[in-house]
Amino acid sequence: MLSKIAAQWRGKFSKATSQMKRLVVTLLFGLAALPGPARAEEPIGCALTSAPLMAQPDGSILIGCAGGLTDPFGEQLVNVLNKMLQSRLDPQAVLAKLEEVEAVPEQGVARTVSDNQRHAIMQALSGKQAEQIAVVAHPLAEDSAEFGKGIATPLIMLGWQIEGNQIRRAAPRALDAVAGVAIVVHSRDAVPPKAQQLKAALTAAHIGVQLMSDPGMAADGTLLWIGRRPVFMEADAKR
């Protein structure tokens, strides 16, 4: 059954904005028809749809996705579309960037850092000053420590220091729900150079990473967070 993402763009936009929205959704998700309940053999995907007996204001659209998306992932999709619209991002450029992000392994397969990714990290940081960062892995994610170790290894080879000489297993309240990889700094308005370099290196290695702020961090501190695996589908979330 189609899982409805909370994406009824109910802002009072003009018709021109509505047309731009439809272009964004078309390019990002495609417009494959999804009639009736989704079957197992049907590909996972999203499309513009309509809800019976539900009036949609002018300039609004409804997106339906087959496969049963989790609520957190649905919210992230909405955030992606909001960012594209509010920042007037070129959909083609966004799609090109998405091709550079390494896919998360299937459920049950551990996240790893490949030789090519290690080389890309080292190449991006080669010749730059070695820094010190903290690395924290979520204790309830079975592959988080090894994945963190895979990222930390090329850093150590370049002379970077890991605080405490270890990857800590902890789940700070502010980060517990953050899936994937994140770089945490005191303020996004004053990102330390080492955090910028680390983010650029991970991006070069096609490792998806988000930048987050935590006022409790030191002004020059940088923490690499390895969270739970992102969970896209309800079926995987129940496993």
Image (cartoon, helix red, strand yellow):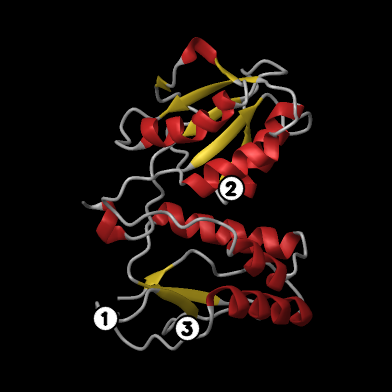
- Which numbered disc, 2 or 3, marks the residue closer to the eye? 2
Q: Residues within 10 Å of mark 1 (few under 14, many from 20)?
A: few
Provide residue 59's location: percent of width, then percent of height: 67, 78
Q: So how many labels did they put on this image?
A: 3
Q: Is residue 59 visible?
A: no
In the rendered structure, the answer to whether residue 22 lies left or right of residue 40 reads: right
- Which numbered disc, 1 or 3, marks the residue closer to the eye? 1
Q: Is residue 77 above or below residue 119?
A: below
Provide residue 165's location: percent of width, then percent of height: 48, 13
Residue flagged by tag 3: what amino acid is it? Ser
Residue depicted at x 72% and y 18%: 220
Q: Residues within 10 Å of mark 2 (few under 14, many from 20)?
A: many
- Which numbered disc, 1 or 2, marks the residue closer to the eye? 2
Along the line of sight, the residue nearer the viewer: 145 or 235: 145
Residue depicted at x 43% and y 83%: 53
Q: Is residue 127 visible?
A: yes
Q: Residues within 10 Å of mark 3 (few under 14, many from 20)?
A: few
Provide residue 80's location: percent of width, then percent of height: 60, 59
Residue depicted at x 37% and y 33%: 146
In the rendered structure, the answer to whether residue 196 lies left or right of residue 173 reads: right
Q: In what element is the residue under mark 1?
A: loop
Question: Cβ–Cβ below 8 Å for labels 2 and 3?
Answer: no
Which residue in the protein does label 1 denote?
Answer: 41
Which residue in the protein does label 2 denote?
Answer: 205
Which residue in the protein does label 3 denote?
Answer: 50
Q: Quadrant of residue 111?
A: top left
Question: Cβ–Cβ below 8 Å for labels 1 and 3?
Answer: no
In the rendered structure, the answer to whether residue 239 lies left or right of residue 184 reads: left
Provide residue 73's location: percent of width, then percent of height: 45, 56
